Image (cartoon, helix red, strand yellow):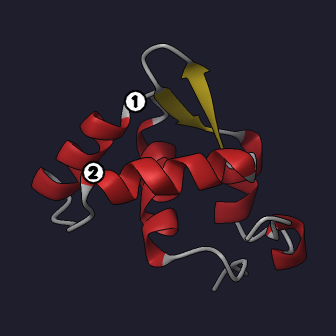
Amino acid sequence: MRPRAAWMTDSDDTLLEFLSEYELALSPRVIEYNLNTRHKSSISYSTVNRRLKLLREAELVEKEYEEGGFYAITNRGHAYLKGELDADELEQSDQ
């Protein structure tokens, strides 16, 4: 099991795994739609949107197009999925 920071949830892992699998920059709405229809997850749009913002603050995802809100996984996000990041490295001061 990969180390997870105290602020992280199962939804964060689901989002990162999805973005890693497809290697695309996607909007929160498209991510939510595909997770719920194709991957049989039950993550709401508001949760996807909220968690992506936190993952961005932790530099696990990046916002590639500010106006459209397209998110993609970063190298740091890939490192997290591989278990290469210590949970202490993921702690956020405002959490």
Side of 71 where 88 appears, left or right: right
Per the rendering, the mark at residue 51 is: none
Q: Amino acid at mark 2?
A: Tyr
Side of 78 where 35 appears, left or right: left
* Mark closest to the chain's N terminus, 2 or 1: 1
Where does residue 55 sit, x and y in percent of width and height? Answer: 62, 53
Residue under pointer 1:
26
Q: Residue furthest left?
A: 37
Tell me what residue is drawn at x 86 percent, y 66 percent: 93
Judge whether 74 appears above or below 76 on screen: above
Tell me what residue is drawn at x 37 percent, y 30 percent: 27
Disc 1 on helix, strand or loop? loop
The image quarter containing residue 72 is top right
Q: Quadrant of the N terminus?
A: bottom right
Q: Nearer the viewer, residue 91 or 80?
A: 91
Per the rendering, the mark at residue 45 is: 2
Where does residue 52 sit, x and y in percent of width and height? Answer: 52, 48
Q: Amino acid at mark 1?
A: Leu
Q: Nearer the viewer, residue 7 or 76?
A: 7
For the residue carrying disc 1, how many other residues have a C-alpha within 10 Å: few (<14), some (14-19), or many (20+)? Answer: many
Where does residue 44 sit, x and y in percent of width and height? Answer: 25, 59
